[in-house]
C-alpha cells in the first residue's frame, strides 16, 4: 500500500514531466501507454482524479506468440497464459469498480474497424472525435492498422497448445473478451464453475461461463477467413 505523502510526491514528479512534454508538443492532454500500469491503477487514480483508462486487450494466444521469444516475460506457454490473464484480470477488476473511468477495446476490433472503435473511445474519453483524421493519417503513413497481427496464435500453436493455454483462469479472461475457446472437457468446465462459485479469479468477470449472447456481435467466421488469408504472409511479431 502506498501512503498519501508518497502519492502526492509521485504526482508532483510525474506532472512536472508531463507538463514539459505538453509544452514542447503543444498539447493539452497526456496519453501514456504502459501495459504494466494495470497493477498500479488504484495509485494512478488517486494521483489523477480525472484519469481515464483505455484497456486494449489482445487475444492472449497471439500475445503468447509475441512475448515468448523475447528476453523478458514468461518462458513457457502456461506461464504466458497466466501472465496475460493476470494483467487482463487486474484491469477488469479495477474497471468494474470504476466504470465511469474505464473503457475496453479489443485489439482485433480496433485494427479491423479503426474508425468505429476510435470514435467510440473518443466519445468515452469526452474529447473531440478525430477518428477519421487519425485513420486517414495512419493509413497513408508507415504505421497502418495491421490486420496481419490477428490470429497468429491459431497459426503458430498446435491444437494441444491452444487447449493448454486456456487452463487455469485464462479461459475466464478469454470468455470475458469474447475469444473463441477450443472444445473443453466436462471436467474442465466443472473446475472453472467451482472457481467461480468459490469467488476465485473467474469471479472478477461476473461468473458468466456462457457469454454467447454478449459475444454474438463478434463474427468468428470472419476471423477464421482473415487468418487463412494471412497465413501465407510473413509477419513481424510485436508486443501489444
Image (cartoon, helix red, strand yellow):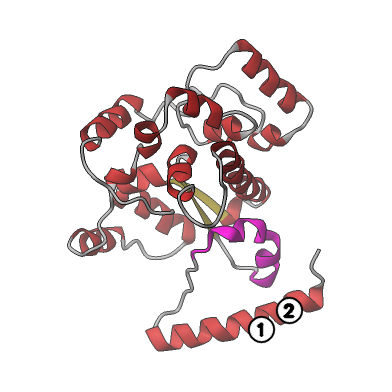
Image coordinates for residue 32, horizontal then vertical, percent: 50, 68
Q: Is residue 146 magenta?
A: no
**Badge 2 density bin: few <14, some 14–19, many ≥20, Cα 10 Å:** some
Above or below residue 7? Residue 39 is above
* Left or right: residue 51 compared with residue 158: right
Residue 54, image x and y in percent? 50, 56
Asked whether 205 or 239 is in front, the reply is 239
User: Could you tell me if the residues under marks 2 and 1 are in contact, i.e. CB atoms within 8 Å?
Assistant: yes
Give the mark count: 2
Name the chief secondary structure element in magenta. helix
Q: Is residue 84 above or below residue 203?
A: below
Vertical relation: 61 (above or below) 220: below
Quarter of the rendering containing residue 218: top left
Q: CA distance from mark 2 to mark 1?
A: 6 Å
Residue 94 appears left or right of 181: right
Q: In this figure, which residue is indicated by the disc labeled 1?
A: 12
Q: Is residue 41 magenta?
A: yes
Give the quadrant of the N terminus: bottom right
Q: Pointer 2: what residue?
A: 8
Determine the secondary structure under disc 1: helix
The magenta segment is 33-48
What residue do we see at 34% from left, 41% from top? 150
Residue at 62% over, 26% down: 208
- Does residue 200 appear in this view? yes
Q: Is residue 140 left or right of residue 158?
A: left
Residue 138: name its quadrant.
Answer: bottom left
Amino acid at each position: 500500500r502506498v501512503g498519501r505523502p508518497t502519492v502526492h510526491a509521485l504526482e508532483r514528479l510525474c506532472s512536472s514531466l508531463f507538463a514539459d512534454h505538453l509544452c514542447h508538443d503543444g498539447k493539452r492532454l497526456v496519453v501514456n501507454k504502459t501495459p504494466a500500469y494495470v497493477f498500479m491503477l488504484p495509485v494512478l487514480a488517486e494521483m489523477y482524479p480525472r484519469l481515464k483508462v483505455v484497456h486494449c486487450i489482445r487475444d492472449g494466444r497471439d500475445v503468447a506468440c509475441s512475448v515468448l521469444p523475447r528476453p523478458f516475460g514468461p518462458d513457457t506457454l502456461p506461464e504466458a497464459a497466466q501472465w496475460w490473464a493476470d494483467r487482463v484480470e487486474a484491469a477488469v477488476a479495477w474497471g468494474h469498480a470504476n466504470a465511469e473511468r474505464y473503457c475496453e477495446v479489443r485489439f482485433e476490433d480496433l485494427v479491423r474497424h479503426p474508425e468505429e472503435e476510435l470514435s467510440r473511445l473518443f466519445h468515452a474519453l469526452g474529447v473531440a472525435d478525430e477518428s477519421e483524421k487519425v485513420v486517414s493519417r495512419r493509413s497513408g503513413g508507415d504505421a497502418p492498422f495491421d490486420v496481419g497481427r490477428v490470429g497468429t496464435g491459431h497459426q503458430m500453436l498446435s491444437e494441444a497448445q491452444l487447449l493448454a493455454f486456456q487452463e487455469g483462469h485464462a479461459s475466464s479472461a478469454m470468455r470475458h473478451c469474447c475469444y473463441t475457446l477450443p472444445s473443453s472437457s466436462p471436467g474442465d468446465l466443472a473446475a472453472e464453475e467451482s472457481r467461480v462459485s468459490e469467488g476465485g479469479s473467474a469471479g472478477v468477470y461476473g461468473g458468466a461461463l456462457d457469454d454467447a449472447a454478449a459475444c454474438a456481435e463478434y463474427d468468428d467466421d470472419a476471423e477464421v477467413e482473415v487468418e487463412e488469408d494471412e497465413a501465407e504472409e510473413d509477419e513481424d511479431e510485436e508486443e501489444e
